[in-house]
Image: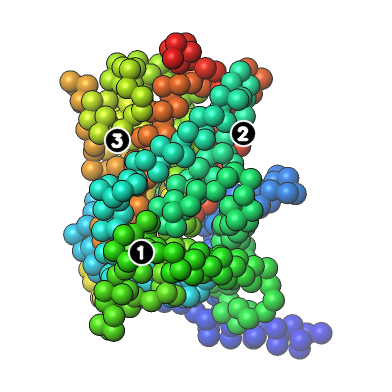
Amino acid sequence: MLSSLILLWIGFGLLFFLFRTRRPKNFPPGPRPIPIFGNLLQLNLADLLNDLRKAPHNMPIHFISIFRDKCKLSERYGKVYSIYIGRKPAVVLNGVQAMKEALATQSLVFAGRPQDLMINHAGEFKGVALTTGPIWKEHRRFALITLRNFGLGKQSMEERILGEISYITSHLEKNAGKAIDPQILFHKAAFNIICSVLIGIRFKHEDEFLKLNIHYITESTTILNGPWAMIYDMLPLLRHLPLPFQKVFQNSANMRKSLGEQVSQHKKTRVPGEPRDLTDCYLDEMEKRGDDGSSFSEKQLIACLLDLLFAGTDTTSNTLLFAFLHLMTHPDVQERCQKEIDEVLGEKEQASFEDRHMMPYTQAMIHEAQRVADTVPLSAFHATTKDTRLMGYDIPKGTLIIPNLSSVLNEESQWKFPHDFNPSNFLNDKGEFVKPEAFMPFSAGARVCLGEGLARMELFLILVTLLRRFKFVWPEDAGVPDYTPIFGITQGPKPYRLGVRLRDRASLH
Ligand code: HEM
Ligand SMILES: *[C@@H]1O[C@H](CO)[C@@H](O)[C@H](O)[C@H]1NC(C)=O
């Protein structure tokens, strides 16, 4: 008995010794890691256990909420501190100064991506969001230019967005006087807008392709936020076992297959030089490049489509969900936007993105909604591409970097009303729209959201069109509104009901 205890003890000691982790020299400070887990268990365990106990059995547990860091490590260790994820050191950036110095000033040094997390393996090292080097550079450039050129094309981005909005409007009209769950509606709308840009198709809301792919996205996101992704990242030995995280790989494979079918269709029906959508543009580009040694290929195209679908669906719809939650519960803000929209649009049939320049208050409201929505709180993880120095610390090449965008969007020294929903955060004394440098919901630098232009156009056109036609009211029986987000890689509000009323001026038409 005693000898086995001693053996166990020695075993543990050996384990600690073998897996002991030491911070590199002059590395940002942080809590002392324990073997295997690093600092993950110290970060937020009490909170997590609490969530586990309270959550209804059908609610996914967001293990990633460990990263909420209730321990206030940045207060203890400073704006730039480090934690260990398993055996891997990561540097957390807090506040606008550190964020700018890393992501903007040293843009390319901080523009890498970690390559050994589950999410990267699911991406098979192709596409744009998770790659580095020439593949990333070439595809990012292609996607940016293509999305920009849609403004000029035959069917412009704006028309595609307005097309989808007409379906939202008719759904809401049918439900005027009632309260609906807006989540699926916005989710499908965001998905459809991107599909229209990528593959030129808008799906009926009952369509199987749409439902299935949204299911894949939702399920994979839940797993990526959950305990299995963390186990995958910490314990490489388990990666090939048939554990629940394999679902993420299956889902990606299924999506690649159905997107591959769309690409084959395009190859049959396309007219070279007359692109209908991003896929056609890519096939033109492939033809133009021939064998010039660049990374363009059909596999890369499919990976890009997947990336854009993943990156553009939840983000946009969660931002909309937060915007409408705040509009319902701040009727004064809603009415002021409506007054401005009515005045600027007059008898015009549809809003256009250009109208934003005449709507400073509405612009301020939309930016404020993005600020409080805080949709991607820790951005996407970065990695350093060379040894570097940041705010006096040395950070080796290949270090995982976690940009805490939340910390900037809520930074007390940067905002007039950091803790409220108040469009005045984006208005100067003259009532003009201004954008403080701490507005970084799309991150910053070389990796800044590739869909920013599209996302901003979507938010503006959807919000303006719906506010013009409807009044949104917090249902009387809904109790006190809860603004606490459900934490995740992308976060949204808890489910709520949207009370829909037709506006008087809309009934005049
Ligand atoms: C309100 C909506 C959106 C928000 C808040 C948002 C936010 C972000 C953030 C924070 C990042 C990480 C940047 C970084 O690594 O530092 C990102 C990356 C990205 N986003 Fe968005 N995004 C939105 C909509 C979209 C849309 C509609 C698309 C699709 C066209 C899109 C495509 C991408 C892509 C491809 C990346 C990866 C870029 C790269 O790694 O170079 N996003 N986004
Ligand atoms: C990120 O910033 C928020 C807001 O300042 C803070 O509450 C949270 O602890 C920070 N998270 C990390 C991982 O540092």
Tell me the mark number nearer the camera, choosing from 3 and 1: 1
Question: Contact (CB < 8 A) between labels 3 and 1?
Answer: no
Looking at this view, is 378 or 224 the one in front? 224
Ligand 1 under 8 Å from disc 2 Cβ:
no
Residue 497 location, quadrant: top right
In the image, is residue 145 above or below residue 193?
below
Q: Is residue 106 visible?
A: yes
The label shown at residue 271 is 1
Instruction: Check disc 1 and report its element: helix, strand or loop.
Output: loop
Instruction: Check disc 3 and report its element: helix, strand or loop.
Output: helix
C-alpha distance separating marks 3 and 1: 30 Å
> Which residue does the numbered mark 3 point to in the structure image?
353
Residue 304 location, quadrant: bottom left
Q: Residue at x 53, y 85 (%)?
A: 18
Q: Residue at x 62, y 29 (%)?
A: 180
Quarter of the image with the N terminus is bottom right
- Bin the neighbour count of mark 1 within 10 Å (Cα to Cα): few under 14, some 14-19, many 20 and up: few
Residue type at mark 2: give it.
Asp
The label shown at residue 181 is 2
Tell me the mark number nearer the camera, choosing from 2 and 3: 3
The residue positioned farthest toward the right in the image shown: 1
Q: Residue at x 27, y 43 (%)?
A: 438
Q: Quadrant of ligand 1?
A: bottom left
